[in-house]
Amino acid sequence: MGKGKLEKFQDLGQMPHVFQNFKWLDPKLLNYKKEVVDYRGKWSKEVFKNDHPIILELACGYGEYTMAMAEELPNKNIIGIDLKGNRIWTGANYVQEKGLNNAVFLRSAIELLENFFGANEVSEIWIPFADPHVRDSKSKKRLTGPKFIQLYRYLAGKEGIIHLKTDSDLLYEFTLQVIETEGCTILENYPDLYNSTFNNELLRVKTRYEKLNISGSARVKYVKFRLN
Ligand SMILES: C[S@@+](CC[C@H](N)C(=O)[O-])C[C@H]1O[C@@H](n2cnc3c(N)ncnc32)[C@H](O)[C@@H]1O
């Protein structure tokens, strides 16, 4: 039988490559020794012990992209981030079993990342199958909204690259509008990804939510853009 939530939370708390924040106000990252750590501007040097570029997977859920990128991109440092510890456990456990030393996980709200990273510390951000927040009243929670673009500009600077993969027409169209109003530059745009010719094999990675196909859409959409 698989592990339950509580066992997964216990496991997570003992993994050296997992860092967790439990507070919205006064956020602090705790390591597996329950020590407060501050790696702002120092993730590559102090955590990964190299100077490789950092890629974030936001709202990573079970961490499929983090797992795949850690295996496929040994010269990058990958950080999977999600609120839900029982989901992160899957990726964190995989990374541990495979002995991958270029991936870690953060259990945190994305909104708090300014507390945990230095300016321009990140090179790319992947956002696969984020919640589209279909109701207008929740639109501020969409991870490609202007407030988040501002956060990503802090994390990744003008050269920062964002990858959005979604089956939601609403989130895709919303993102295209934000790209325009925010003056970002589209680098690749596939309204029907799997019926397009693309070079990046990572785009074939299917996350848990992609497989669930909640929107019922026949088309997966992908847009890659530079923040500017
Ligand atoms: C629709 S699921 C997608 C998960 C994964 N990307 C996938 O494709 O299977 C959305 C995920 O976003 C996470 N999430 C939502 N809001 C978040 C926030 N503000 N900060 C961190 N994670 C968040 C949820 O915990 C959930 O795992």
Image (tube, grey):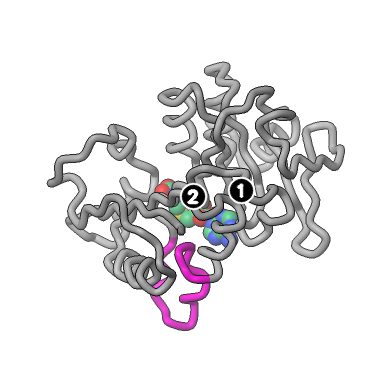
Residue 159 badge: none
Residue 95 lies, in percent from the top left, at 55, 25
Q: Residue furthest left?
A: 195
State the residue in front, 171 or 46. 46
On the question of residue 103 being in view, the answer is: yes
State the residue in front, 119 or 104. 119
On whether residue 80 falls in the magenta region, the answer is no
Q: Residues within 10 Å of mark 1 (few under 14, many from 20)?
A: some
Query: Which amino acid type is marked by label 1?
Result: Asn
Residue 152: quarter of image: bottom right
State how many labels appear: 2
State the residue in front, 68 or 227. 227
Q: Which residue is mark 2?
A: 160
Residue 54 lies, in percent from the top left, at 56, 37
Task: Determine the residue positioned at 53% across, 26% down.
Answer: 94
The answer to whether the residue labelled 2 contacts the one labelled 1, judged by CB atoms less than 8 Å apart, is yes
Q: Which residue is mark 1?
A: 120
| Residue 136 in the figure: left or right of residue 157 | left
Q: Secondary structure at mark 2?
A: loop
State the residue in front, 4 or 167. 167
Residue 140 lies, in percent from the top left, at 51, 75
Q: Secondary structure at mark 1?
A: loop
On the question of residue 15 being in view, the answer is: no
Q: Residues within 10 Å of mark 2 (few under 14, many from 20)?
A: many
| Residue 141 in the figure: left or right of residue 214 | right
On whether residue 137 falls in the magenta region, the answer is yes
Above or below residue 25? Residue 221 is above
